[in-house]
Amino acid sequence: MSDPMDYDAELRLHNEVLRLACDISRHDRVLDIGCGAGQTTRDAARIAAAGSAVGVDISAGMIARAQVLTDAEGLRNVRFEQADVQVHHFPSEHFDVVISRFGTMFFADPTAAFSNIRRALRSEGRLVMMVWQDHEANEWSVSIQQGLAGRDSAPIVFPGGPDPFSLADPTTVERILSAAGFAETTFTDVHEPVYYGEDVAAALDWVRGFSYTQDMLQRLDAPSAESALERLREALAAHDRGPGVWFDSRAWIVTAIR
Ligand SMILES: C[S@@+](CC[C@H](N)C(=O)[O-])C[C@H]1O[C@@H](n2cnc3c(N)ncnc32)[C@H](O)[C@@H]1O
């Protein structure tokens, strides 16, 4: 039986880097922003054995999945809430550490969202988040885009849609965090590959599930969509390194202090 592909599998190497950077202690109260299916929330809770971890995500489906996985593990110091982090009323000055694995790039008003997050942190509390560097620095993004749209195509922007690269620019992030009341912002380059599946068929299935891929294919007529998928298949095959399909990627770990 092959392992199912999911976001935890894609980010298996990133996760270890983030876990170390979070530097959670046994008594910490941890808040995980945009927690998805909750792997990072559970990782935090295991370390904060005498503390707790709360995962928050806007998606009810993700929160339900996170709860199922947590119940299966029998973890008692984890809680999940479905909420929009931008406006949710968190307990004020409550958490020691706020963490996020690629869950903070999708805010309509990032300054308001990070101000809200900051209010939930105790004085001197820490923010540790992983965000993508820009499209050009991410082989996975360039390859998918060129596969779908053709080699000489410009990056496609979906106005108003979620932008995974919205926190790629350190100057912008520094400005947003500073306006939200954070200090001592740092950026650490994370250069790890992402995993897309054990073979080309698994990787194609995985990439076809991305909203970017679905939006792109919906814009094309049937013959053009078939050509796009064939180019995408070739791009994935070129990155099949024997033990699976891997693409280079670049992320930041951003830290800041309340
Ligand atoms: C790329 S996923 C990352 C999920 C998770 N952190 C992980 O690494 O598996 C981004 C997540 O952020 C959530 N999200 C986006 N905007 C949000 C908001 N305003 N409030 C809470 N969650 C949000 C999405 O629902 C999604 O689950």
Image (cartoon, rainbow, N blue to C red):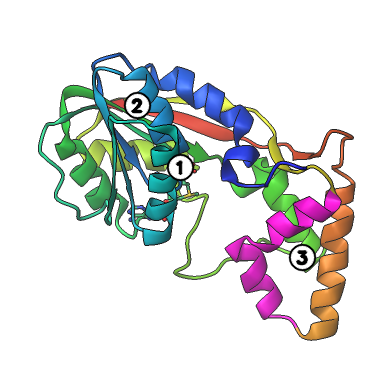
Taking depth in this image into account, of 137 and 224 the one nearest to the observer is 224
Residue receiving disc 1 = 69
Expressed as whole percent of the image width and height from the top left, the position of residue 50 reads 24, 17
Specify the amino acid type for callout 2. Answer: Ala
Question: In the image as oriented, which residue stretches furthest toward the top?
Answer: 26
**Along the horizontal axis of the image, is 222 left or right of 173?**
right
Prevalent SS, magenta region: helix
Query: Would you call the spot at circle 3 few (<14 residues within 10 Å), some (14-19), or many (20 or more)?
Result: many
Q: Residue at x 64, y 28 (%)?
A: 191
Quarter of the image with the N terminus in it: top right
The mark that comes first in sequence, 3 or 2, is: 2
Residue receiving disc 2 = 45
Residue receiving disc 3 = 148
Specify the amino acid type for callout 3. Answer: Leu
For residue 106, which quarter of the picture?
A: bottom left
Residue 103 appears in view? no
- Helix, strand or loop at label 1? It is helix
Q: Which mark is residue 102?
A: none
For residue 208, which quarter of the picture?
A: bottom right
**Residues at marks 1 and 3, CA–CA distance in whole angstroms:** 34 Å
